[in-house]
């Protein structure tokens, strides 16, 4: 099996490529400079050159607040570009794997979102990701959509790296304590994505670290400071008392991973365990 990954300079793509290579999978990544997925001619040329059996689309517009301002850019990248890719996949019999998000849900539920719960995004980023899903589902190509949440990893601009940076620059920070979800290590995502592909998963799957009914950003921040043995006072703050951001976030976006666990016949790791594993990886 030959795999091509788009957006390979990104946080998740890097981890997927590292993990799949370790598992001796033939995988090649193309960065934005090598393949701009909004350019359908370039897409066709590159895919014809590399002749993959499977494409993992990690390229995305991920700046949630900026998406409220740069609406066209976000729509083209998160919705239209996946459509361009599916057209090529359908014609060439290539399996398409796409990464989507918990932010397609509104957060009104009080228990984890099932893959077939009705999406109703609160922000434009979530809406563009939902449109992307619709284009893929209706494309007629073979696909796997993996929705994940609160991704963090050893590098890039994510919640873990922000808190670690804060421990070096500040004595205290305020962190929101009334938005709940499941933090997910890019290591978990990469590992179990490969398992899903190997078990021939099709359709929509939820893949996150296990966080029960969800934890708050505040709990996550406190745990990071503890696990990394740093010093930083974490002050809980409600969304309404925090700095107003352009994009609204759901108060609740934990994804129900039980169908994925059932399909894999395996439990996904607890979020604290994944955080500890990442700490060990970063310390060594
Ligand atoms: N981060 C999260 O918390 C989270 C949560 C749920 C789901 N997801 C989803 O997970 C996936 C991966 O996210 P991530 O956190 O790894 O994002 P990321 O680090 O921002 O990576 C996205 C990559 O896409 C590239 N890119 C941008 N425009 C492109 C274009 N026109 N053509 C090709 N590549 C382009 C970016 O390149 P430049 O850096 O050069 O712009 C970047 O390398 C996304 O689909 C995202 O929606 C993320």
Image (tube, rainbow, N blue to C red):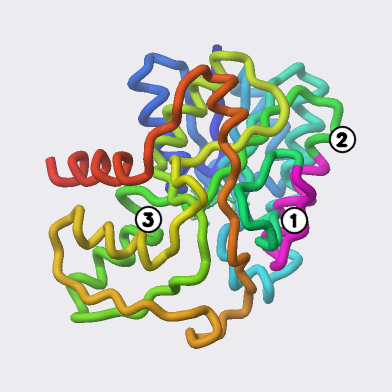
The answer to whether one can see residue 80 in this image is: no
Residue drawn 36% across the image and 62% down it: 219
**Disc 1 and disc 2 in contact, CB within 8 angstroms:** no
- Tell me if residue 121 is in the magenta stretch: yes
Sequence-wise, the earlier of marks 1 and 3 is 1
Answer with the quarter of the image where residue 198 lies.
top right
Tag nearer the camera, 1 or 3: 3
Would you call the spot at circle 3 few (<14 residues within 10 Å), some (14-19), or many (20 or more)?
some
The residue at which mark 3 appears reads as 156
Q: Residue at x 46, y 36 (%)?
A: 189
Highlighted range, magenta: 117-135
Q: Residue 41: percent from the left, percent from the top? A: 75, 39
**In front: 268, or 36?**
268
What residue is drawn where x is 41% and y is 41%?
186
Q: Is residue 72 left or right of residue 173?
A: right
User: On the image, numbered disc 1 is attached to which residue?
Assistant: 76
Q: Nearer the viewer, mark 1 or mark 2?
A: 2
Look at the image and tell me in which quarter the N terminus lies.
Answer: top right
* Label 3 C-beta lies within 8 Å of the nearest ligand 1 atom: yes
Secondary structure mostly seen in the magenta stretch: helix
Task: Describe residue 39's horizontal placement relative to residue 246 as left or right.
Answer: right
Figure check: 74 above or below 275: below
Q: 15 above or below 198?
A: below
């Amino acid at each position: 099996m030959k795999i091509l990954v788009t957006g390979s300079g990104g946080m998740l793509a890097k981890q997927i490529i590292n993990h799949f290579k370790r598992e001796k999978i033939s995988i090649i990544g193309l960065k934005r400079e090598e393949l701009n997925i909004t350019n359908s001619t370039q897409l066709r040329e590159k895919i014809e050159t590399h002749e993959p059996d499977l494409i993992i689309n990690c390229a995305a517009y991920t700046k949630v607040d900026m998406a409220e301002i740069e609406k066209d850019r976000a729509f083209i990248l998160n919705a239209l570009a996946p459509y361009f890719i599916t057209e090529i996949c359908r014609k060439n019999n290539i399996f398409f794997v796409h990464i989507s998000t918990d932010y397609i849900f509104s957060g009104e539920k009080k228990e984890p979102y099932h893959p077939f719960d009705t999406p109703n995004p609160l922000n434009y980023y979530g809406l563009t990701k939902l449109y992307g899903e619709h284009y893929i589902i209706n494309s007629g190509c073979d696909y796997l959509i993996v929705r994940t949440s609160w991704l963090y990893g050893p590098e890039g601009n994510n919640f873990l790296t922000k808190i670690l940076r804060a421990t070096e620059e500040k004595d205290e920070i305020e962190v929101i304590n009334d938005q709940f979800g499941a933090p997910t290590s890019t290591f978990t995502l990469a590992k179990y994505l490969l398992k899903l592909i190997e078990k021939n998963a099709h359709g929509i799957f939820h893949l996150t670290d296990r966080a029960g009914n969800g934890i708050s950003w505040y709990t996550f921040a406190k745990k990071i400071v503890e696990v990394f043995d740093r010093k930083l006072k974490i002050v809980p703050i409600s969304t309404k008392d925090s700095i107003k951001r352009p994009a609204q976030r759901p108060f609740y976006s934990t994804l129900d991973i039980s169908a994925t666990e059932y399909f894999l016949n395996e439990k996904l790791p607890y979020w604290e365990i994944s955080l500890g594993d990442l700490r060990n990886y970063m310390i060594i």
